[in-house]
Amino acid sequence: MANVVVVGTQWGDEGKGKIVDLLTEHAAVVVRYQGGNNAGHTLVVKGQKFIFHLIPSGILHAGKICLIGNGVVIDPEVLLQEITKLQAQGIEIGPHNLLISEKAHIIMPYHQRLDLARERAKGDGKIGTTGRGIGPCYEDKAARCGVRTVDLIDPAVLEAKIEHNVKEKNFILQKFFDEEPLAVGPIVERYRQYGEALKPLVTNVSLVLDETMRQGKNILFEGAQGTHLDIDHGTYPFVTSSNPVAGGACTGTGIGPNRLQGIVGIVKAYTTRVGGGPFVSEALDADGEHMQEKGVEFGATTGRRRRTGWLDTVVLRDSARLNGLTGLAITKLDVLTGLNPLKICVAYDCGGQRLTVPPASLAALEKCTPIYEEFPGWQEDITQVRHLADLPMAAQNYLKKIAEISGVPIQIVSVGPDREETIVLGNPFAA
């Protein structure tokens, strides 16, 4: 039995969905442990595209159980739409393969209204949130007034919580943001209906995981976003509102840290970022445009164009330490085909000082400039390569440098978007 966490090592969008899909073959259960529908995974399986926002991508595998943990914040409308869309694509979904934690918090209409109002009020200083209500929902969770899934299926409790919360949120919306108020009745009625629809899927996820482990079966833990969007360890305040780091798998599902055996860090072969915030290795030139176009760098959730740049190993080394990485999965290596030379950011220059760890100060980080090492590129199409030794030598050397700098062995290399376009060097569940 082994339990493996898949975590993003950059600012999200590293290609975690494909890696989770690959590793699901070896797991009995796949569980999402944080974030909300501000995250998105795009998967291509035999030419068919699937987009996931809340449901673990392991749902594409028959005979697997997918769980949404207590650390996730759920927009029930989005979840039900996602279920309907996947069913229309031929994926069977029900209590036999999808379950939701009774302790997960629910995103409400007032969360979305507050999220959008705040971003508008910040003007040029906006953080770049998706406007999905994620942050305000986590705020209510911390303030101990949030609506949980267990409340969603209890009409009396649901109505009382909504009445209390709407009164407070309307005061903020009207008096501070000069926005229109929300009506309680329609919200109560709509969310009662959501509760009825989701009731068969609601359970104690922690108990399901414990029983799975007692049976000696493998579990795959799936994080959203990336390490440097972590509320505690990321480029604050340009971060998400939860803990994407591997430790979040424990608090976000209800298991002890001694139950985790493998931590796989997903690393895009270059770097991307959505929204505001410092991006030391950003490439605002033809190379950056190449990565954006060849990598089809648009958010699966928002459709926003991603900022692109060279691989930043200052960020990667930090992620290796913060997560306790045991292996790396390199994604989108094929996107670098045709670029020459290739660059890797190995350190930052901050006012003449060489830094190998990102500074906590946002002001200091914004002043940093990249220190690059250059490497020969390659021209050959690598999408059909299935063995490391068959890659162009320049590509092999590029991968060796990533492993050397990070101090973490590479277990998987993705050379294309399809499930089959992958080089597997080691199985994290067998380590």
Image (cartoon, rainbow, N blue to C red):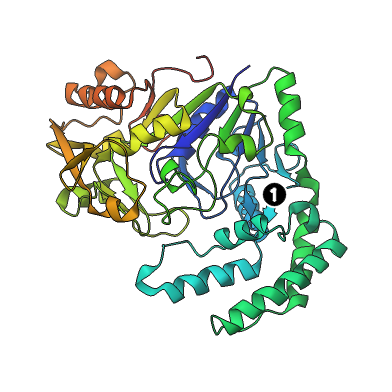
Q: Give the percent coordinates (x, y) of residue 370.
A: 19, 44
How many numbered circles are shown?
Answer: 1
Q: Which residue is mark 1?
A: 104
Q: Give the percent coordinates (x, y) of residue 327.
A: 42, 23
- Relative placement, left or right, of 325 versus 109 is left
Asked where in the image residue 147 lies, by quadrant, the reply is bottom right
Asked where in the image residue 184 lies, by quadrant, the reply is bottom right
| Residue at (30% x, 19% y) in the render | 388
| Residue at (66% x, 65% y) in the render | 108
| Residue at (72% x, 70% y) in the render | 165
Of all residues, the one furthest to the right in this rendering is 156
Asked where in the image residue 252 lies, by quadrant, the reply is top right
Q: Nearer the viewer, residue 249 or 218?
A: 249
**Quadrant in which the N terminus appears:** top right
Local packing at callout 1 (Cα closer than 10 Å; few below 14, some 14-19, many 20+) is many
Q: Nearer the viewer, residue 356 or 88?
A: 356
Which residue type does callout 1 highlight? Ala
**From this viewpoint, is residue 331 visible?**
no
Q: Nearer the viewer, residue 47 or 357?
A: 357
Is 144 drawn above or below residue 405 in the view shown? Answer: below
Does dot 1 land on a helix, a strand or a loop?
Answer: loop
**From this viewpoint, is residue 98 visible?**
yes
- Relative placement, left or right, of 266 versus 308 is right
Q: Give the percent coordinates (x, y) of residue 84.
A: 65, 53
